[in-house]
Amino acid sequence: MLEARVKQASVLKKLLDAIKELVTDGNLDCTDEGIALQAMDNSHVALVSLKLAAEQFESYRCDRNMPLGVNLTSLTKILKCAKDNDVVTLKAADDADSLGLVFESPKEDRVGEYEMKLMDIDQEHLGIPDTQYDATITMSSAEFQRICRDLGALGESVKIEASKEGVRFSCEGEVGNGSVLLKQSAGRDAGGASGSGAKKPKRDPDEENEVAEGQEVDEEQEDEKPIVDEEGEDEQEDEEEEVKPKKRKSNGKAAAKPAKKGKTAAAADDSDVGVSIILEKQVSLTFSLKYLSNFAKSAPLAKEVSLNMSNDVPLLVQFEFEQGSLQFFLAPKISDE
């Protein structure tokens, strides 16, 4: 029996959006280690490998190994019935011919139960050898998606060159030519430094002058004590009590302004992933932009993507996220020369 509980339906939705255009049918291989899916596209050019670790589920139980043949288009339609923050439970009995899906709201005040018919899919499981790649590029997944989209407007193929200069994406098409060069950066290191700096935000000079002037005025008011007779002492004390709370409020507002700026700066630095390049040997390969654009649809799953390249070896595009990993393998285009 299988019973797997996913904390948020949005995770499954993003996964299916990333692979549904490459793979239509596939086996969900359920074991005590988790759920895996491996399938090739119809052209046998790209390979998809998905792994969801058992310990990353809210609860997971799988009594024996079982393949669940599913149509990803049908599964996508059923998952649309769930809200993004719903808890999803996948259920399947031994030798079952259907997969049960239970959608439960966080407040447990709404429960939806659905069943999807399973398929008998005769599919070979390919062994993926461990490869020592000549170049490994780690970059922002959003930037990777943007590059694929922009160059896709020019042509059908992109040449990826990794060198000491950086990594260059270049495209030649009927419309024109274009290239994007990404150089090695320390975005993640800079983000850590800025995070500590956010605790002590800097004040603007104008704000410091305003605070200093306010303090001087307060001191002058304290020094200038009005001369009053004994009958007016009570009235004077009442007026001072009314003035003091107002001063405290104004000082509190002045101190709060720079704190907001510090938080904004820290959030901006966290979003800057940067580019990391590990280069053993210079690599230059050409790939189909159609497939890379499909791979880039996984960007909502993870902030980073790694491109692993070696000459005459399929490209490995890998997304690591909290629940597991999603890998795409793409064969390079053979040069006509």
Image (cartoon, rainbow, N blue to C red):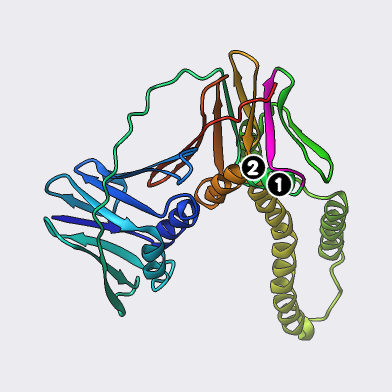
Q: Is residue 101 above or below residue 153?
A: below
Report the magenta residues as a range.
154-163
Q: Is residue 293 above or below residue 138?
A: below
**Residue type (three-letter) at the residue carrying disc 1:** Gly
Is 39 one of the magenta-colored residues?
no
**Residue type (three-letter) at the residue carrying disc 2:** Leu
Residue bearing mark 2: 289
| In the image: residue 109, left or right of residue 222 | left
Residue bearing mark 1: 152
- Quadrant in which residue 186 is drawn: top right
Is the stretch drawn in magenta largely helix, strand or loop? Answer: strand
CB contact under 8 Å: marks 1 and 2:
yes
Residue 108, position in %: x, y?
29, 75
> From the image, which quarter does the C terminus lie in?
top right
- Is residue 199 visible to us here? no
Residue 42, position in %: x, y?
45, 46
> From the image, which quarter does the N terminus lie in?
bottom left
Residue closest to the eye, 77 or 266: 77
